[in-house]
Amino acid sequence: PLLRVRPAVPADAAARLAAEQEVENLSGLSPNPEKDIFVVRENRTTCLMAEFAAKFIVPYDVWASNYVDLITEQADIPLSRGAGMKGKCGTNESELELSWLDQAYTLKLSFLKEGHNTSRGLEASWRLSRIQFTYDSSERTYFKDAVSPGKYTASSHRLSALVTPAGHSYECQAQQTISLVSSDHQKSVQLLLSEVRLQPFDIPADFVFSEEHKCPVDQREQLEETLPLILGLILGLVIVITLGIYHIHHKLTASQVQIPRDRSQYKHMG
């Protein structure tokens, strides 16, 4: 009989495979039980870091009490703290894949870095380019008596989210909602993200984020918080300047010789 020999895996492919498996779920280090922390490392160096709280809102059908009509219920599915993970890093493409509750739920986030021609020349940025969420409506923790239970996939189309200049991390404390379209009769699944700090490329040192690029909502909230302080400082400065001018004017006026207006006061003169 012929002996079949499996072809050897090229060294570079084996290295890439090893890099994909070097992942760490550090969610237990977060003081917020709803926030997860994931790290992908290549050659013992961090190449992707992600911190966020996530929840999915998934509509599904159940029978009405008459067992004739269908009504829509809603499953609120949080990302489990004990999620398993995979990840891979690349020069222009990176990926993070999470799964929980015995593979009943899987979330895959894909990132893309690209260059753009601007008035200042060629500038690079990265973005969240694709989201794919797979869920099993026969799983009973979050789905109760679903009609036609089974595995479905909700995904994004032409997504351009979390856009960030290259060499920076993305930060957004405010809640963001991203809509996904499900294979379950085109239902709309909502992904709620909050407390996000994320960087899939160009991490400067192991477990260290680059300078943050804040989302517009956080920038606006920060401005709203600091604007009253700035206006108060300006008003206080105006008051101080006004009082200073008044004080100087008063001293100059007081030092001038006052000419008496009553003619009788001129009798001693002459």
Image (tube, rainbow, N blue to C red):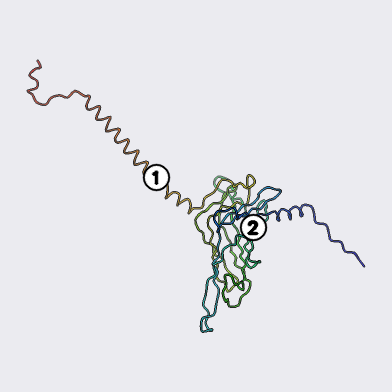
Identify the residue position indicated by label 1 in the image.
Answer: 229
Percent x, y for residue 66?
A: 51, 84
Mark 1 is surrounded, within 10 Å at the Cα level, by few (under 14), some (14 to 19) or many (20 or more) other residues, namely few
For this rendering, which residue is in front, 75 or 156? 75
Image quarter in which the N terminus is found: bottom right
User: Image point 54% across, 51% down: which residue?
Assistant: 171
For this rendering, which residue is in front, 263 or 3? 3
Q: Amino acid at mark 1?
A: Leu
Percent x, y for residue 35?
A: 56, 57
Q: Amino acid at mark 2?
A: Leu
Q: Which mark is residue 92?
A: none
Percent x, y for residue 61?
A: 55, 76
User: Image point 90% across, 64% down: which residue?
Assistant: 3
Identify the residue position indicated by label 2 in the image.
Answer: 96
Q: CA distance from mark 2 to mark 1?
A: 41 Å
On screen, 248 above or below 32? above
Which element carries disc 1, helix, strand or loop? helix
Q: Give the left or right position of residue 118, taking residue 19 as reference.
A: left
